[in-house]
Amino acid sequence: MTAAVSFSQVSRHFGPVKAVDAVDLKIAPGEFFAMLGPSGSGKTTCLRLIAGFEQPTSGHIEIFGETAEGVPPYRRQVNTVFQDYALFPHLSILDNVAYGLMVKGVGKAERHRLAEQALDLVKLPGYGARKPGQLSGGQRQRVALARALVNKPKVLLLDEPLGALDLKLREQMQEELKSLQRSLGITFVFVTHDQGEALSMADRVAVFNNGGIVQAGTPQEIYNRPRNRFVADFVGSSNVIAPANMQRLGGETRWASLRPEAIRLVSEGGIAATVMSESFLGSATRLHLRAGEIALNVMVPAGQATPKPGEDARVSWLPTDLHYMDGEA
Ligand code: ATP
């Protein structure tokens, strides 16, 4: 099957800075693909390379089987939704959405009809006459989305599109984006540094570090089987245990990760530890324990009694819950 987006050994260096370095990547048509990683890891540069705002220093990019080389941004079947929405404040919502069509020479009646359709799609029917300043942050975000969708792109690039929204609105928009993507069948490539957002929304996630992809896989693969310490540390809140400590715990002498929810409090057996602190999270309580020099986060479901800071506890887990991995950080 032809990939929607394909990178072969793509690099984008800025002088000595290797913003993107020898990246291989294949995004399938219709996939919701998240690029996850810390600030400066190369996610935005990858997105700009797909959009055509940036050219590779070396390597090859294809979009739906066609080389992207020499193809300007407006001729790619790709649109971008930026974090700051980049709406024109003096234009009406309808004209903001219709702007790209106007540039392409689509007549007024037709572009307004298509813009109204796009506003329906993002659940803003009847808002066309307003100006951006008369909308809430969440509504402006939808307008930015409508403006990208009106061009009927085959690939939609989203650069931290929910970053400016408060938590509740963010969660609501996450669900809306996902169902919109499913119903339209467009390939979405989504940049975020929020691991929860990437895991909950994406079909596949690529974890970036230092301009490269450390691991790409389904959210379950990334979460349950992190390739190395970096992925385990960055995604979720896994306990990362060093080889020497693993040996002391009776496991293999290798780096391992252990999810907080896999650790159980037991009354006898297991390993003796001391509770250092606790955080109430609503649906669970997170305990921070120390067993000698081994620090362990434990997630205790709500309703279960928990030992208090300073008290002793015993913990145990199934050997199969230990995930061994590379020590590379
Ligand atoms: P963030 O989450 O903060 O947006 P990011 O993962 O998207 O980060 P990029 O914006 O792709 O990271 O940047 C990767 C690296 O390339 C950074 O070190 C950045 O400073 C550098 N970089 C990006 N654009 C340029 C440029 N035009 N000139 C020089 N360096 C750049």
Image (tube, rainbow, N blue to C red):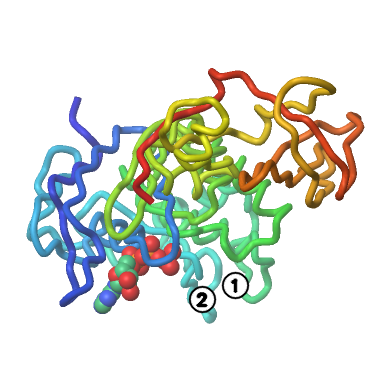
Residue at image coords 50%, 70%: 84
Answer with mark 1 or mark 2, whichever residue precedes in sequence: 2
Identified by mark 2, the residue type is Leu
Q: Position of residue 209 (x, y in %)?
A: 35, 55
Q: Which numbered tag is attached to residue 172?
A: none
Cα–Cα span, label 1 and label 2: 8 Å
- Given residues 123 and 241, the one toward you in this image is 241
Q: Quadrant of residue 137?
A: bottom right
Image quarter hosting the N terminus: top left
- Given residues 229 and 88, the one toward you in this image is 229
Q: Which residue is the site of mark 1?
A: 132
Residue at image coords 60%, 34%: 259
Q: Quadrant of residue 121?
A: top right
Q: Which residue is the site of mark 2?
A: 91
* Number of other residues with Cα within 10 Å of mark 1, as a class: few under 14, some 14 to 19, many 20 or more: many
Q: Are marks 1 and 2 in contact (CB under 8 Å)?
A: yes
Q: Secondary structure at mark 1?
A: helix
Residue at image coords 53%, 18%: 320
* Number of other residues with Cα within 10 Å of mark 2, as a class: few under 14, some 14 to 19, many 20 or more: some
- Given residues 250 and 296, the one toward you in this image is 250
The quadrant of the rendered image in which ligand 1 is seen is bottom left
In the rendered image, the vertical position of residue 131 relative to residue 74, given as above or below: below
Q: Nearer the viewer, mark 1 or mark 2?
A: 1
Q: Secondary structure at mark 2?
A: loop
- Given residues 253 and 233, the one toward you in this image is 253
Q: Position of residue 166 (x, y in %)?
A: 70, 61
Q: Is residue 101 left or right of residue 82?
A: left
Identified by mark 1, the residue type is Pro
Residue 107 visible (yes or no): no
Residue at image coords 10%, 50%: 60
Q: Is residue 3 left or right of residue 112?
A: left
Q: Position of residue 168 (x, y in %)?
A: 73, 52
